[in-house]
Amino acid sequence: MADSATAKKMARPGASFARRYGLAFVSVAGALLLELLFHRFNLPHPFAAFALSAIAITFWYGGTKPGIVAVLFSSLIRGYIFEAETSSLSRVLYELVFLIFAILMFWVRRRREALELAIADRTAKLTAANEELHREKEQLDGLFELSPDAVILTDEDFHVLRVNREFTRIFGYTGKEVAGQRLPDLIVPEELRAEALKNRDWLSSGNKVELETIRQRKDGVRFDVSVVAKSISLGFDQVAICLIYRDISERRKAEGELRRSEGYLAEAQKLTHTGSWAWNVRTGVLFWSREIFSIYDYEYQETGVTWPQFLERIHPEDRPLIEQSARMESSGKEWLDSQIDFRIVLPDGNHEAPPFSRASC
């Protein structure tokens, strides 16, 4: 089998050579036969026209060298067979015509080869580009479906073009149910649809929309979501809107519980006139509860006062103990708990000694 395949490969160049140069002889021979046939029936028989056609066919399908052979073959036939019918000037003109036509066909052949190479190169590039686009599309499709958030693609009027699996899980609609439907009519509560229309105008201007709002599921249940939306180009002057929804119900619930706990703690500290604070020894940031500000007679703010401001309220005799404890805490490799009793000095000069101050670092 291997020897047979090798023999075929070796035979191909020879077969191609025979076909190309055989074409030169066959085409010119055909021109001669036509000339003789026309002559037999007393019809106009311009051999030159037949020969030029044979030359053109050989150049086009056989190549440059076989085409030159066809020119020489045609010239020989015209010279030896039809020489008596033409004058010397005519023979020169015939030879000149054959030469000029051969040059013209050579140029045409070169242009054709260059065009074929350009087309082949362009085709290869387009094929590679199409394969790359196909791979990118597969990757994007994978990311689209594997996204942990609900992803929706709509047109400029919010008609649904495509949704992913997470959208179905969160909102309860399948892709077939929402295809072509207006998204606000499906998931936006009626009283919030005017807001959605405002967002559409904002998106049409090329802006990005980020918000937290309320949406509803297929069964009518409402829940908290975060939304990110942006218009994107699909090419060919087509614009779509990509919307990403995330269910934040659990986060909102946790935030509500935290606010309630903070409220209970603040009320308890206010009733007992106690407070809590924390100090990050690495960053130097102090965090105080609301009642601590009241105890130290500072205006409430989101973060605690600075360390120097805190030391201002410490009794001068107790400051060395606090500073020493702070150095020990800041140099420790592990978090430590300490209990220290110290006095504070209020702006009016009064002294107050809390039962203790526990610092958790």
Image (cartoon, grey):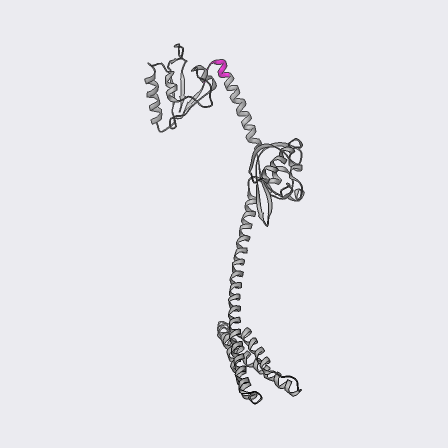
In the picture, residue 153 is in which quadrant? top right
Q: Nearer the viewer, residue 228 or 78?
A: 78
Residue in view at x 59 percent, y 48 percent? 237
Q: Is residue 23 visible?
A: yes
Residue in view at x 40 percent, y 19 percent? 358
Horizontal and vertical percent for residue 196?
A: 62, 35
Horizontal and vertical percent for residue 214?
A: 61, 32
Could you tell me what secondary structure mostly forms the magenta stretch?
Answer: helix
Residue in view at x 34 percent, y 17 percent? 319
Let me know if residue 274 is in the magenta part: yes
Judged from this view, the residue extending furthest toward the front is: 89
Let me know if residue 303 is in the magenta part: no
Q: Which residues are magenta?
A: 268-275
In the picture, residue 184 is in which quadrant? top right
Horizontal and vertical percent for residue 309?
A: 39, 19
Q: As drawn, is 100 to the left or to the right of 278? A: right
Judged from this view, the residue extending furthest toward the bottom is: 84
* Quadrant placement of the C terminus: top left
Count of labels shown? Answer: 0
Q: Nearer the viewer, residue 118 or 161?
A: 118
Asked if residue 338 is positioned above or below residue 3 in the image, the reply reads above
In the picture, residue 221 is in which quadrant? top right
Horizontal and vertical percent for residue 26?
A: 57, 81
Q: As drawn, is 100 to the left or to the right of 181? A: left
Asked if residue 132 is positioned above or below residue 45 in the image, the reply reads above
Asked if residue 20 is positioned above or below residue 262 in the image, the reply reads below
Q: Is residue 73 visible?
A: no
